[in-house]
Amino acid sequence: MPEGEDITRRVTIYDVARAAGVSASTVSRAFARPGRVSSATAERIHRVAEELGYRSAEVYRPASQGSHTRVIGLAVSDITNPFYFGIIRGAERAAATADFTLMVGDAHESSEAERRMLERHLPLVDGMIITSSRLSDQDLRSIARRLPVVVLNRKVAGLPCVVPDNPRGIRRAVEHLASLGHHKIGYVAGPEASWADGMRWRAVRESTLELGLDDARIGPVHPTVSGGRGAARRVVEQGLTAVIAYNDLLGVGLLRGLEDLGVDVPGQVSVVGFDNTMAAELVGLTTVASPAVLLGETAVLYVANLVNRTAQSRDALSVLPVRLVTRTSTGPRR
């Protein structure tokens, strides 16, 4: 074990629950809603929490605030990914309109970091939007039993979900590359645990099959510029003339990596991204435009309706439209 790991590891609500012999929800109530736990149990939980070094201030909420905080949490998988800028902007705008405050948490592309972040945030919010989660469906349903939850950029049966139209976007990208004479379409995959990645790869396979094309998969690759840069050599080794990247960051990285290898884009290889972030526009990357701002707005309005008990359904699915934006990274096959 690396030096200092025991010191830096955060004590979680589950650690306190095990040591105190109660459930995690009882620990949460002891800090967030003291009046709903017996004084003896609350005293034991606080004593154990102090002994373990649990940072109770992170989840304490004075009883005088009542049962509602008017705060909506927004969990994102990687706050440095430009895709989330639009989602956060749309969510903030919609939250202000609905008289809520938005609180953003970063999962750092890690299921464990996501779990810890959610445990810190859940006692502080009235509802939660969980974006591109790396947790299991069962975990997400368990959270939804504690408070209103909307899942963004992923489908989970039984929960309200908001997603971009991944199949249509990929289909448009494949059709565009086929119209340029490319016969084999590569897909540079993102995180293995990503629902969106699975949907996009499936759409590539279905689209190429319908159009009589071949396909190839590279990855999974870390969904960053450096990840895309590292995948460029594999694109060349497989002799691909056209590739679709899981997201724009991978797409930008591919452009940089191919340039490093002396490969002409789009003369020798055409590259398509997904999301239409500012980075794609700056480097001339053809990409599928995902309605990020609308995704954030829609998710907040739905979770606000759940909190206010005005939602029509608790398992609605909103599929938002996408479009293909062509730029200089795609061209005719030589």
Image: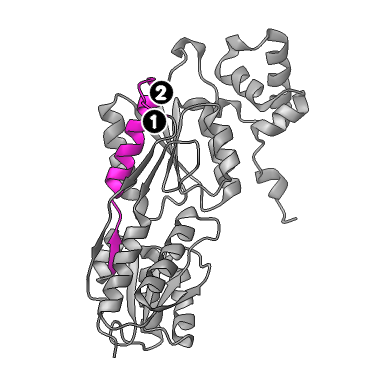
Q: Position of residue 104 (x, y in %)?
A: 42, 39
Please provide the residue range marked out in magenta.
Answer: 286-313
Specify whether residue 125 is in view: yes
Q: Position of residue 68 (x, y in %)?
A: 43, 18
Residue 277, placed above or below residue 121: below
Residue 235, placed above or below residue 227: below
Quarter of the figure that contains the N terminus:
bottom right
Name the foreground residue: 167 vs 141: 167
Dot 2: within a 10 Å radius of its alpha carbon, few (fewer than 14), some, or many (20 or more) residues? some
Query: Callout 2, which amino acid?
Result: Val
The scheme the figure's colours follow is one colour
**Residue 266 shown left or right of residue 61 in the figure:** left
Query: Which residue appears at 50% of the width and 36% of the height?
Result: 158
Query: Which residue appears at 40% of the width and 25% of the height?
Result: 306
**Residue 175 shown left or right of residue 42 in the figure:** left
Query: Which residue appears at 35% of the width and 21% of the height?
Result: 310
Whether residues under marks 2 and 1 lie with C-beta atoms below 8 angstroms apart, the answer is: yes
Outermost residue toward the bottom in this view: 334
Per the rendering, the mark at residue 303 is: 1
Q: Quadrant of residue 275?
A: bottom left
The residue to which callout 2 is attached is: 307
Query: Callout 1, which amino acid?
Result: Val
Secondary structure state at the residue bearing disc 2: helix
Q: Position of residue 62 (x, y in %)?
A: 50, 15
